[in-house]
Amino acid sequence: MKALKSIALLLFVLVGLLYAVAFWYLRNPSMGIGSSVQIKHRADASRLKTHVEFLSGIVPNRSYQNADSMFRAERYISDYLTSLGYKVSLQEVYEDKTVYHNVIVRLGAETGPLVVIGAHYDVAEEDNPGADDNASGVAGLLELARLLKENEPELKSPVELVAYTLEEPPYFATFGMGSVYHADQIKERGEEVKLMLSLEMIGYYSDEWFSQKFPIPLLYALYPWRGNFISLVASPSERKEVRMVKDSFSSIEGLKTYSINAPTILPGIDYSDHRSYWEHEWPAIMVSDTAFYRNLEYHKPGDTAGRLDFEKMKLVVEALYTTVVNVP
């Protein structure tokens, strides 16, 4: 009996150690809350809604198969950034005998490693409005651009805000991705990237139990089962950068933030434009509501603006603003 108790105790200790190691490795806990930033001009939920409704309302949808719709989305993004006073540049992305464009603005310091924040504006599937995927990310990018223009913070690094074309299949994970073109262009210019943030679906949240799904059982023991948080997703190489970003996000009251640093063998870790910057060994993080692990209308006709939480999106934008200002 004594031997059995000893074995049970040993197993209990081993399970506890394994849990602690998994928690430390995957959750990558930070030591506190980052520096808060004064935001005089705040993010606006109604503006976010307007952007999402316009982009998701384009018919036919903004798929690569509907070039005119892609160009309409591109013009909307470009015109809005121009209206804010930015100088907009269009980077040609030539695929399948069609010229698409990344829409880019640059601000901040004149020299130094870049901070890149991007979101793709195309959609997958013919009958998908793409409100969460990824009009929400583009709306967040546009609202971030407005905050940076109106608040005029002193940025320590040069910053590029990029709306990418061609993230979705059949271009995903190929050299035809708009973000691949952008990352390659930076490399060709002889510049380096300090931090890249990919805004990949930031609009869907739920307080219902079991609304959050995970690819492996272990993660159910490490993360909440309610899908009411924003996630920071990265490889094991970005542990320092994830803690830095998470500290800035944690300074935003009302925004729950969780992170994961995991290898790409875990499905979903590299499912966005951040992967294009990993190819150059630059630190890149996906900011996401976890996509199909939460939003059951992913790539379906039900991915509409009415399902999104624009108040929560507003907090994500302010967290992004705080991050950009805090980047050393």
Image (tube, grey):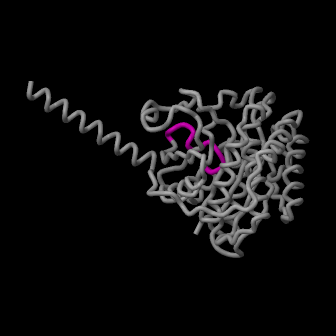
User: Does residue 103 lie above or below 173 as drawn?
Assistant: below
Q: What is the residue that sits farthest to the left in this orientation?
A: 2
Q: Position of residue 208 (x, y in %)?
A: 58, 28
Q: Position of residue 122 (x, y in %)?
A: 78, 42
Dominant SS in magenta: loop
Q: Quadrant of residue 173?
A: top right
Could you tell me how many numbered marks the image carries? 0
- The residue positioned 89% from the left and 55% from the top of the image is 79
Q: Quadrant of residue 281?
A: bottom right
Looking at the rendering, in which quadrant would you find the C terminus?
bottom right
> Can residue 204 be found in the magenta stretch?
no
- The residue positioned 53% from the left and 60% from the top of the image is 34
Q: Position of residue 164 (x, y in %)?
A: 75, 50
Looking at the rendering, in which quadrant would you find the N terminus?
top left
In-image side of 6 versus 187 (left or right): left
From which residue to which does the magenta span run? Answer: 265-275
- The residue positioned 72% from the left and 37% from the top of the image is 132
Q: Quadrant of residue 279?
A: bottom right
**Is 316 or 185 nearer to us in this picture?**
316
